[in-house]
Image (cartoon, rainbow, N blue to C red):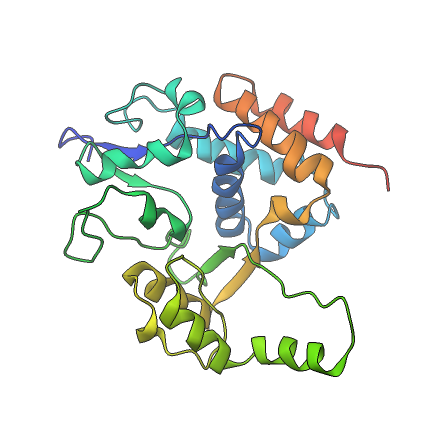
Amino acid sequence: MVADGIKPWCAGISSGTATGWPLTDWLEDIIMRQQGVDFYDQWVAHDVPFNDPKVADSLDELGAILKNPEYVNGGIGDVSSIASTTFQDAGLPVASGQCGMYHIGDFYGSIFPQGTTIAEDGDVFAFALPVWEAGDSMTTEVGGEFATAFSDRPEVVAFQTYLTSPEAANAQAASTTTSRVSPNSGVDASLYPSPVSKLSAETLTDPSAVVRYDGSDLMPAAVGSGSFWTQITNWITGQSTRDTLDAVESSWPAN
């Protein structure tokens, strides 16, 4: 892509008080692939420190992409533009061919301008971040919603049970205008109106799928939606890998 005059990656992490979260997804994806899901699970649970040397290796791998001026940020600016560009705007240059790819959740299809064709042979499409080495299992990071009951009345329990069924998931798939997909193996993926949602659903229901929940969402709030966001923003604007990870580690609650 560089040889063809295209910046491979677009990136933007500005998101108001949540600025930085897109980089946490990036790092989590790399850790899962480079270090393995067992290590990822230990890191998320703080069974290994946040600043473990393996995490530093993965953050440096991310830096090799996003801190390389030849690789970012086509149609937007240089590396320094990543922190100031909103995640909503950052992927738009993909549709105009100014950058090749954008790392983001499958919801992003709804953000492209009206008239953008999202399909394998269209203006833009999606793919899963590849495995680290040939033969590795494909891993997928997800976020999710939960149906929580505040009463154990029979009709409440019955409705909650219904929401776990393929019938409920199929009804939602056929009617939704969002990017929600279900991991229920009984869902008919052809019902999803978006080709990206179909791709996500097929990925989630693949019997060989290795799925992990978003790490920052599982961490204590002081870290996952606090120091992790702020420190990785500091990192993309020049702070060292070591100082970044040490600062997050020091913020981890004692209990």
Residue 72 lies left or right of residue 21; in this view the side is left
Check the picture and name the quadrant holding the C terminus.
top right
Residue 93 lies left or right of residue 254; in this view the side is left
Q: Identify which residue is drawn at 47% across, 58% down.
A: 140
Image coordinates of residue 95 in percent, x first then y, are 20, 40
Q: Identify which residue is drawn at 81% across, 36% down.
A: 253
Image coordinates of residue 46 in percent, x first then y, are 73, 45
In which image quadrant can residue 55 be found? top right
Residue 52 lies left or right of residue 126; in this view the side is right
Q: Is residue 7 above or below residue 24?
A: above
Image coordinates of residue 86 in percent, x first then y, are 41, 29
Q: In this view, does 59 lie above or below 208?
A: above
Is any atom of residue 206 visible in this view? no
Q: Nearer the viewer, residue 18 or 4?
A: 18
Q: Identify which residue is drawn at 53% across, 51% down.
A: 32
Residue 248 lies left or right of residue 105; in this view the side is right
Is any atom of residue 115 visible in this view? yes
Check the picture and name the quadrant holding the N terminus.
top left
In which image quadrant can residue 159 be found? bottom right
Q: Nearer the viewer, residue 222 or 24?
A: 222
Q: Which of 191 and 245 is in front in this view?
A: 191
Q: Is residue 125 above or below residue 194?
A: above
